[in-house]
Amino acid sequence: MSLNLSWRSCVIAVAVLTAALAGGIAVSVLPAADAQTTTHLTSVLSNFSVGAINGYSNLPEFSGSGDGVRGVACTGAAPRSGPDIPAQVVTTLRTDLTYLRILHNNGTPLTGSVLINCVFDVLPTAEGSATMQRLQEASTAAG
């Protein structure tokens, strides 16, 4: 009986070792992870001057998804006190440009010139890079 038990143990041990060896071979056959290519570029524009009329505004014409922009999110920057605080900024990315809805802290539409901060996610293409360059230039000129 002890001979039977030892044969069983040997068979189980061989099966476990075979499975481990097969798993090791399978892992070694997988291709090595190469350096990941960048699928997007992120840029922040601070203190971008926009004029809102009854809460409506937009970023320049070259800020849409057709220009290589994959995503944009903006928030109010200034003024921080007084009657025209840009407390809520809703962004809508369209093909041609980015529309903005700028509201006071109580939800009423804002009219006036305010500063906003925006985070852009653009494609890593020549078009996306050119769009970011143009947006940075517009931000510098406006500020």
Image (cartoon, rainbow, N blue to C red):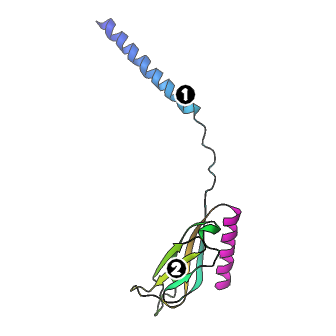
Disc 1 marks a residue whose amino acid type is Ile
**At x 69% / y 72%, what residue is drawn?**
133
Residue 132 belongs to magenta span: yes
Residue furthest left in the image: 1
- From the top left corner, tell me how far across and down residue 130 is, in percent: 70, 69
Instruction: Kindly indicate whether the residue at mark 1 contacts the one at mark 2 (C-beta within 8 angstroms).
Output: no
Q: Residue at x 52, y 79 (%)?
A: 100
Q: Is residue 31 above or below residue 128?
A: above
Q: Residue furthest bottom?
A: 83
Q: Percent position (x, y) of residue 69?
A: 60, 67
Q: Marks 2 and 1, how far apart in space?
A: 55 Å
Mark 1 residue element: helix
Answer few, some or many: residues within 10 Å of disc 1's Cα (few below 14, many 20 plus, some between 14 and 19): few
Give the magenta range: 124-143
* Helix, strand or loop for disc 2: strand
Report the mark closest to the observer, 2 or 1. Answer: 2
If you read the primary sequence from the N terminus, does the residue marked by circle 2 or circle 1 appear first? 1
Q: Which residue is mark 1?
A: 25
State whether residue 128 is above or below residue 1.
below
Classed neighbour count for the residue bearing mark 2: other residues with Cα under 10 Å, few (<14), some (14–19), many (≥20): many
The residue type indicated by label 2 comes to Leu
Q: Quadrant of residue 38?
A: bottom right
Q: Residue at x 33, y 6 (%)?
A: 3
- Label for residue 35? none
| Residue 107 at x, y percent in the picture | 40, 85
| Residue found at the very far front of the displayed protein | 95
Left or right: residue 16 compared with residue 40 = left
- Relative depth, front residue between 120 and 4: 120
Q: Main secondary structure of the magenta part?
A: helix
Tag shown at residue 100:
2
102 and 19: which one is in front?
A: 102
